[in-house]
Image: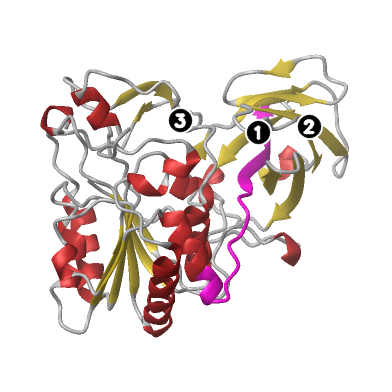
Amino acid sequence: MANTAPKVAPEERQEAPEVIERKAEALAKHIRKSKHLIVFTGAGISTSAGIPDFRGPEGIWTLRAQGRQRTDMVNTLQAVPTPTHMALVELQNRGILKYLVSQNCDGLHRKSGILPVNFRAVATYERTVHDHRTGRECARCGGVLLDSIINFGEYLPAQSLQLAHEHAEKADLCLVLGSSLTVSPANEVPGVVGRRRRAKLAICNLQDTPLDWLTDLRIYSRTDELMIRVMAKLDIPIPSFILRRRLIVRTESAGGGRHQLRVSGVDVDGTPVTFLRSVKLEYNRRVARSEPFIIHFRGDIEPGTQLRLELEFMGHYGEPNLDVWYEYVDGDEGDAQTLYLLEYNPQTGEWRTSKLEALDTDDGMHDVPVRENAGLIPTDDKALSNGVKGANPPEVIVID
């Protein structure tokens, strides 16, 4: 896309605070009345996290057209979800947001707590060779890991695009946040809503978009400035970002009367996740430093024995090591596992740990509790995860 970007970015407009305030009230009224709200997000919602957009004055494509490069980009692994990201999570959790379509592949929607239903990632760079191999292997089966990026020149998954259009046909309100709506076929999704009678289209973007003529509400503002106001008028607090990790500790029989512990990360949908650097068992000199993290036992251990595991994380958010207690189960009685929710607050630097209910199935590592709301239900109600509370979750799709 750099070869089509102009050297001078289109003008950005910022409306006066009192104008944004008035339009935030109008948008809040639309949201209150909405029965099927969908949101379409672009790179503009992540700029306050230090991730540049593409077509702004300092955007990636604009600078490339000028023969320049950004030198102050934040690593997406360390970026913190913005107030806009967290506002969308809370709208999801309350059942207000029904569907999210995004052009972003910075991972902040997933990290913030948006559920991974029908999730697809999109490349923000050009590749001459469309090779989806990541160079990594699956920690569970050892197979080659492939990314889900849609590179320029590749087709979007037909089913994903179809689902987006189906929700656009159902939507009575579509809110576009931080997108110039210039990349097809993704930009057709808000247009479906804008052209329907009795459905409303609202766009918040600093630059003009080709769909502005279809809007019922057009806001020239940074997305955080709008969404903070909108959530206040809805009387819905925006939650702080909490890094949530899910951990499985599993007792396995290694044959010949021997047993082992397998420690692994897992996503809310059962997908393996890598976030550990090492695992160490108290009083054991050896440290497991590579996936799969397996700790072997030589002697007998009484069932019910409390084992302390020291977890070392990748540390993208400066997470300190964490001790987790695991109650040993006799492997001769069958494989058994415990599922933990690990919550880290980057602002306080503190961890919080709770056990989650797990299901007994024949699929082993797939024993991840996925309820109707696709959330994980802790045994301690006060430690509720980013699952949906009392509402059906929205589906999430990332397309460009």
Which kind of residue does numbered mark 1 sit on?
Val
Disc 3, SS = loop
Residue 291 located left or right of residue 16:
right
Name the residue tied to disc 1.
263
Residue furthest to the top in view is 285
Q: In x, y percent, where is residue 152?
A: 17, 34
Q: Which of 364 and 339 is in front in this view?
A: 339
User: Which of pointers 2 and 3 lies earlier in the amino acid sequence?
Assistant: 3
- Between the C-alphas of marks 2 and 1, the distance is 9 Å
Quarter-of-image position of residue 54: top left
User: Label 2: few (<14), some or many (≥20) within 10 Å?
Assistant: some
The magenta segment is 231-255
Label located before the other in sequence (3 or 1): 3
State the residue position of label 2.
Answer: 309
Residue at 20% in and 73% down: 169
- Toward the viewer: 379 or 242? 242
Task: Quadrant for the N terminus, please.
Answer: top left
Gap between marks 3 and 1 measured at Cα: 14 Å
Question: Are the residues tagged 2 and 1 within 8 Å (C-beta)?
Answer: yes
Foreground mark, 3 or 1? 1
Whether the magenta-drawn stretch holds residue 390 is answered as no
59 left or right of 8?
right
Helix, strand or loop at label 2? It is strand
Mark 3 Cα shell of 10 Å, populated few (<14), some (14-19), many (≥20): few
Give the tally of numbered discs. 3
Q: Which residue is rendered at x = 57% and y = 72% of the image? A: 236
For label 3, the residue is: 141
Residue type at mark 2 is Leu
Asked if residue 131 lies left or right of residue 83, the reply is left
The percent position of residue 195, horizontal first and vertical second, equals 13, 73
